[in-house]
Image: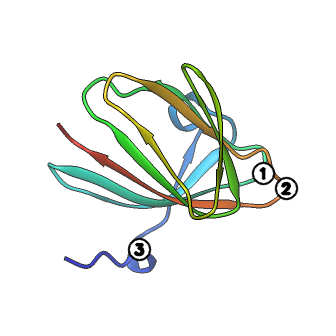
Amino acid sequence: MILNFDNMEEQVIPNFKGGEKELKTHMYTDDLCKIMRATLAPGATIGLHTHETNCEIIFMLKGTGVVLYEDGKEILPAGSCHYCPKGRSHSLRNESDEVIEFYAVVPEQ
């Protein structure tokens, strides 16, 4: 199955997971998985949240994000991947002066 995110309607979600500003995303969902290509403007964040029943994989496409998690902070430059296991908490922040773009995959378990 090929997913063409450019042909999907863009969703603008204010204060995603309690974060700052808004998340812009093109998202595919079914009963088994959520896959999105998303952007965060400078100063925007995805709020700290816990993956109670699933995990999440974030692959940074453009720019550098900052992941806050239970044990600290990770810098997430373009080309790198962050994994949040089931039962753990994390957030994503754009502390830069440019828009960051990433893919996120959340398999339902």
- Of residues 109 and 81, the one drawn nearer to the viewer in this rendering: 81
For the residues labelled 3 and 1, the Cα–Cα distance comes to 22 Å
> Mark 2 highlights which residue?
97
Q: Position of residue 40 (x, y in %)?
A: 65, 53
Q: Is residue 65 above or below residue 79?
A: above
Q: Position of residue 7 (x, y in %)?
A: 40, 80
> Mark 3 highlights which residue?
5
Sequence-earlier tag: 1 or 2: 1
Q: Amino acid at mark 1?
A: Pro
* Extreme residue in the right direction: 97
Mark 1 burial class by Cα count in 10 Å: few <14, some 14-19, many 20+: some
Mark 3 burial class by Cα count in 10 Å: few <14, some 14-19, many 20+: some
Q: Are marks 1 and 2 in contact (CB under 8 Å)?
A: yes
Q: Secondary structure at mark 3?
A: helix
- Of residues 103 and 30, the one drawn nearer to the viewer in this rendering: 103
> Mark 1 highlights which residue?
42
Sequence-earlier tag: 3 or 1: 3
Relative to residue 55, is residue 19 drawn left or right? right
Q: Position of residue 5 (x, y in %)?
A: 41, 74
User: Residue at 36% across / 28% down in the picture?
Assistant: 51
Relative to residue 61, is residue 94 drawn left or right? right
Q: Secondary structure at mark 1?
A: loop
Q: Are marks 3 and 1 in contact (CB under 8 Å)?
A: no
- Of residues 47 and 14, the one drawn nearer to the viewer in this rendering: 47
Q: Amino acid at mark 2?
A: Asp
For the residues labelled 1 and 2, the Cα–Cα distance comes to 5 Å
